[in-house]
Image (tube, rainbow, N blue to C red):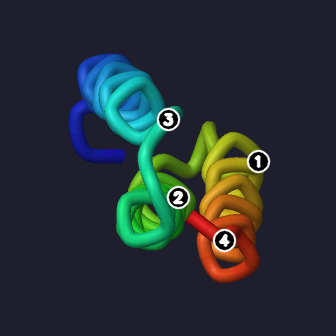
Amino acid sequence: MAGGTDVNILIGVAGIIIFLATYKSGKIGKLFAGLLYFLLGLGMAYVETDAVWVGIIIIFLGLGMTLEGLLSNK
């Protein structure tokens, strides 16, 4: 574990910022946000042994947002 709680707080803040920045954005924004979430989840699942499930949830959130970006018409 590298950093423990500090890493979890940083990941949470980054996730909130990404979500707020792309909530009303178009197709490209959602694709990038989905990929960022996916990478964030991979990093969290790999680094934080205590938070593997949270990382997996973030991975699926990223995949869902990427899919939403691919399927949106905007």
User: x, y (%) of residue 60?
Assistant: 76, 62
Task: For the residues labelled 2 and 3, say whether their Cβ atoms are less than 8 Å apart.
Answer: no
Q: Residues within 10 Å of mark 3 (few under 14, many from 20)?
A: few
What residue is disc 1 on?
Answer: 53
Helix, strand or loop for disc 1: helix
Disc 3 vs disc 1: Cβ atoms closer than 8 Å?
no
**Label 1: few (<14), some (14–19) or many (≥20) C-alpha neighbours in 10 Å:** some
Give neighbour class at mark 4: few <14, some 14-19, many 20+ (Cα, 10 Å).
Answer: few
Q: Can residue 43 be seen in the rendering of this structure?
A: yes
Q: Determine which residue is flagged by label 3.
A: 24
- Left or right position of 8 against 23: left
> In the rendered image, which quarter is residue 65 located in?
bottom right
In 3D space, how far apart are the residues under numbered discs 4 and 1 (Cα atoms)?
32 Å
Dot placed on the residue nearer the N-terminal end, 3 or 4: 3
Which numbered mark, 3 or 1, is in the foreground of this view? Answer: 3
Counting from the top left corner in percent of width and height, residue 1 is at 36, 46
State the residue position of label 2: 41
Residue 8 sits above or below residue 9 on the image:
below
* Local secondary structure at mark 3: loop
